[in-house]
Amino acid sequence: MSDDDAYGRPPTGPGQPGQVQPYAGYGGQPLPPPGYGPGLTMFPQQYKDTTAAWLLWFFLGHLGGHDFYLRRTGAAIAKIVLTLIGWVTVWVFIGIVPLAAVLVWWIVDAATMSGRLQHVNAQVYAHNRALGAAH
């Protein structure tokens, strides 16, 4: 008995011996062509400004302003929630714990800000280069 399909072709696809596996993105899904997919556009993206990131960190760091700017939405939302819970419950002294956590997180963000800026700007460069618009 042959392993060929109804049209006489040998089996192909993921997991077949001798087949080269294409690079897959998250969850094993094939990557979209450059310029398509979540968060990607067909237009060049702007690089993130260091001064803007630091100002957002200093003035809105407890609310995740710099995290939104550096595309870390989950961390920004977590900081907003912790800050709100902290200020709502601070009158019974429970709120000191989440506010202290946000303060520590804010200090850690200061230590890692430069690396995050470089990472985000490297992604922007790769996106712009794929579009032929890198500079």
Image (cartoon, rainbow, N blue to C red):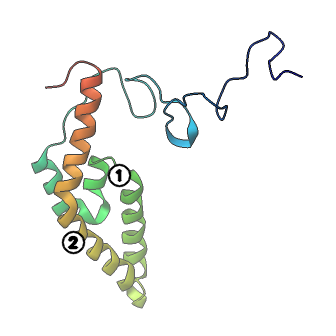
62 and 116: which is toward the camera: 116
Q: Secondary structure at mark 1?
A: loop
What residue type is disc 1 on? Arg
Q: Tell me which corner region of the image, top left, top right, bottom left or bottom right, holds residue 75.
A: bottom left
Image quadrant occupied by the C terminus: top left
Q: Tell me which corner region of the image, top left, top right, bottom left or bottom right, holds residue 113.
A: bottom left
Can you identify the residue that label 1 sits on?
72
115 and 95: which is toward the camera: 115
The 10 Å Cα crowd at callout 1, few under 14, some 14 to 19, many 20 or more, is some
Percent x, y of residue 24: 51, 35
Q: What residue is shown at x 22% (from left), y 33% (from top)?
A: 125
Percent x, y of residue 95: 39, 82
**Left or right relative to 17: residue 110:** left
Q: Which mark is residue 107?
A: 2
Q: Secondary structure at mark 2?
A: helix
* Image vertical order of residue 71 relative to residue 102, above or below: above
**Mark toward the start of the polypeptide (1 vs 2):** 1
Q: What residue is shown at x 38% (from left), y 51% (from top)?
A: 73
The single residue placed furthest to the right in the displayed view is 1
Q: What residue is shown at x 43% (from left), y 81% (from top)?
A: 89
Question: Is residue 44 at all visible to an observer of this figure?
Answer: no
